[in-house]
Image: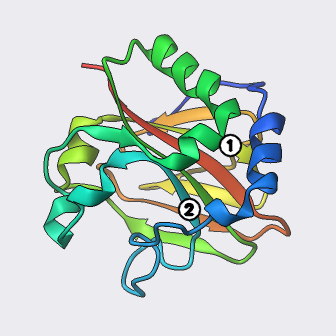
């Protein structure tokens, strides 16, 4: 594979999914990425665990400016994710943890093709890791002309500055933790 790089498999994700099931109110608490019909993430619920402080997100530009990431309340609830995130940071020799979120693509849903260029966070946190918390063989991630179906418990990196998308043609939700970090 040219654009995707597998960095882990067999990651124990059941306890994370159990905590998500026990706390359904966490979905779409912050829906800035998903409420605009022109957004590639429209209609894809997410859970924000770490990003720029909510009090600093006062304009559309604030989402693309330089900032220090802070933990959101969901981080204190989804504690089973902590060792996974810090284990990835250790494995990749990360120097800074940026945004962390969990996305859910329902059956028939998609994240439309887009790239993340032009955002300070996406460019400074140049290592983006997807951890498949729940997947199915008919959920396909694409980056340029390359596609793959991530299995539950796998972790993959790819360059989010390139055009990428996800389509879930399966019968169950695709749930993924996205962990952004700097390894420079």
> Image quarter for residue 13?
top right
Most extreme residue toward the bottom is 37
Q: Would you say 3 lies left or right of 117 here?
A: right
Mark 1, Cα crowd under 10 Å, few <14 / some 14-19 / many 20+, is many
Q: Mark 2 points at which residue?
A: 46
What residue sits 69% from the left and 54% below the top? Answer: 175
Q: Mark 1 points at which residue?
A: 132
Q: Please tell me whether residue 106 is drawn above or below residue 125 in the rendered image.
A: below
Q: In this view, does 92 lie above or below 79?
A: above
Residue at x-position 70% and y-position 31%: 80
Q: Is residue 44 left or right of residue 154?
A: left
Mark sitting earlier along the chain (2/1)? 2
Q: At which x and y percent is residue 6?
A: 58, 28
Label 1 sits on a secondary structure element that is strand
Query: At 29% from the left edge and 35% from the top edge, which residue is drawn?
Result: 126
Q: In which quarter of the image is the C terminus?
A: top left
Disc 2 and disc 1: Cα gap in Å? 14 Å
Q: Which residue is drawn at 53% across and 67% down?
A: 29
130 and 19: which one is in front? 19
Residue 110 sits in quarter: bottom right
């Amino acid at each position: 594979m040219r654009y995707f790089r597998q960095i882990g498999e067999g990651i124990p994700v059941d306890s994370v999914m159990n905590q998500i099931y026990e706390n359904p109110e966490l979905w779409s608490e912050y829906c800035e990425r998903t409420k605009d019909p022109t957004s590639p993430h429209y209609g894809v619920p997410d859970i924000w665990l770490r990003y720029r402080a909510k009090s600093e997100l006062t304009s559309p530009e604030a989402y693309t400016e330089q900032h220090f990431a802070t933990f959101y309340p969901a981080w204190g609830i989804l504690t089973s994710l902590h060792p996974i995130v810090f284990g990835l940071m250790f494995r990749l020799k990360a120097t800074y943890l940026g945004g962390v979120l969990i996305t859910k693509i329902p059956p028939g849903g998609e994240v439309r093709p887009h790239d993340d260029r032009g955002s300070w966070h996406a460019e400074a946190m140049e290592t983006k890791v997807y951890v498949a918390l729940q997947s199915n063989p008919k959920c396909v991630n694409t980056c340029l002309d390359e596609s793959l179906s991530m299995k539950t418990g796998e972790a993959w990196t790819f360059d989010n500055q390139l055009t990428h998308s996800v389509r879930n043609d399966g019968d169950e939700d695709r749930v993924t933790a996205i962990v952004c970090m700097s390894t420079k």
